[in-house]
Amino acid sequence: MQRVFKAWVPNVSGALSFNTLGSGSYPAQPVRANIGDHSSRFIICYQHRTLLDAVSKTLAKRNAIYGEFVCLCVGTSSDDPLCLDDTLRGRLFLFEFADDWKQDAKPMVDDAMQVLRQYPGYSVARTGSTLGNYFQGRYQDLLDNIPASCAFFVDFELERTGVVTLTMPDSIEHQISKSAPRLPTDQYDRSHMERIVCSQLFFFLKDICHNHQHHDPKSDTLVDIHEVNGDEKKWRSNVLRFLYRKVIECKRDFRPASYNSSLGVLIYAKSFRGISMREIGGGDDKFFIPPVVQDDLLETAIKAGFQNSSYKIEASDAVAGARISRYTAAWTLAVTVILLLSITPVKLSEPDLTLIHVGVLLVRYTLPCAAIAWVFYRFKHMDFGKKIDIADMWIARRSLLVLQALDQRTAGFILIGLGVASILGAILFLYFWYR
C-alpha cells in the first residue's frame, strides 16, 4: 500500500521559481543542472548530507564515515507561463556514500547533467524542436536505472505554492540496490523508519529551493512532513501549529536576533494560511484552519519585545563602555603617579616597601594585573541564580559579531589561536612572577 506524505516549503510569495532550485548552499553546496526553455524544464541536483542519528543507526551501520549520504533530485515541469499545471514532478533518491553512488549512479548522473547543460536552445528552437524532445529520453533512463543503485527513493510533486507531496512506491525493496540496508521487518518500526527517511529527503528538497532567511538552517523542525489520507485540512493545521510554535519559541528568547526570527516565521505562517485558504477554502470567509491566532496582536507584541530588548542591550553597552572608560582612566592615573614618584628626586625618610613592590608589580605586569582585576570584578557582580548567556556579555557579543562575519574555518583558527595565546600568556606570567 502506498504511503502519501505532504509538507510545505516555506516561502512568502506563494509562487516558487523552479529556475532557482539547487541554488541553496546548506548544509553543502549542491551540484545541479537546471535548464528550461519555452515549454519545459529539467532539473538534476545532488548534495552530500549528514542524516539524523535515527537514520544513521539503521542505514549507516556499514558506512565508514558515519551517516554521510548523497541525496539526488531528478524532476521536470512545464516552463510555459500560461500552463495551469506547472507542478514539478520527479523522484528523490538516497544513496550511501559508497560504491553504489561512486561507481554506478554518479557517472550516470554526471553524464546526464553534462548533456542537459549542453542543450543548444537557440539552434534547436529554429528547427521547431524543444527541450522535451532533446532530453526526455535521457530523463526517463535516469528514472528507470538509478533506483537499482540507491538505498531509498520516493516520488514527489512540488507545486508553485510550496506544497510538496511525497509518495512511496509499492514493493520498494525489489527496486533498490541489493546491497542497500534493509528496513525493519516489524510493521511499526518499518513505518516509523520510512517516515524518518522521507522526512530527510523532504529536508533535502527544502534546502535546495529555500533560502533560510528568517531562521537557523539547522532548525529542520520548522516544518515537517505529515501523512495524509485525504484530509487536507488536518495536515495544513499541523504545519501551522509547527510554525506558530516556532514563532512563540523565538519570541521567548528575548534577543533582537530571535525577535527578528520570530517575525520572519510569523510571515511564513501568514503566507501558508493564505495559500491554504485559497486552495481549500474556496473563498469562504467563514472557513478557517486552526489554530486561530491573532496575528496582528502577536506581531505587535514581537515588535514591542524587539524594541525593548534592543533598548536594554544599548543601555547595557553604554553602561559597560562608561565603566571601562572610568577604570581605564583610574588605572592610567595610578600608573602615572607611580612613574612620577619613581623619577622625582625626593628622598623618603621612611619608604613603604610594600607600596613600592605593588607599584613596581603594576608597572611591570600591567595587562595581567588588569585582567585579574576584571575577573574579580565580574565574579563580584555575578548573579549565581541567573542563567548565564554568553550573548549577554558585552565583550563576548562584540567578539561573536566579528566571528560571524568570517567563514567557519577562519573563525576556528582564530579561536584556537586565542586559546593557545592565553595558555602561553599564563605560563609566561607565572614564570616571571616566580623568577
Image (tube, rainbow, N blue to C red):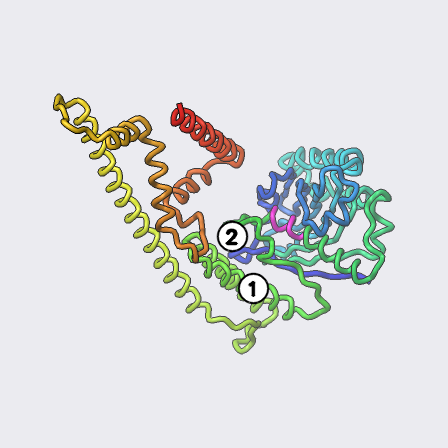
Find residue 192 and report its image quarter: bottom right
Residue 338: x and y, percent?
A: 21, 29
Instruction: Tell me if residue 119 can be seen.
Output: yes
Classify 240 as above or below 105: below
Left or right relative to 273: residue 327: left
Classify 116 as above or below 21: above
Left or right relative to 137: residue 41: left
- Mark 2 residue type: His
The crowd level at tag 1 (other Cα within 10 Å; few <14, some 14-19, many 20+) is some
Mark 1 lies on residue:
275
Query: Under tag 2, what secondary structure?
Result: loop
- Mark 1 residue type: Ile
- Tell me whether the residue at label 1 lies in contact with that at label 2, contact meaning CB atoms closer than 8 angstroms: no
- Residue nearest the viewer, comparing 399 with 323: 323
Which of label 1 and label 2 is nearer to you? 2
Q: Quadrant of the C terminus?
A: top left
The crowd level at tag 2 (other Cα within 10 Å; few <14, some 14-19, many 20+) is many
Q: How many marks?
A: 2
Q: Residue at x 55, y 72 (%)?
A: 283
Part of the protein shown in magenta: 202-208
Residue 310: say if magenta. Answer: no
Residue 264: x and y, percent?
A: 47, 56
Q: Residue at x 69, y 33 (%)?
A: 114
**Numbered mark located on residue 215 in the image:** 2
| Lower sequence index among marks 1 and 2 | 2
Instruction: Tell me if residue 69 can be seen.
Output: no
Left or right relative to 346: residue 19: right
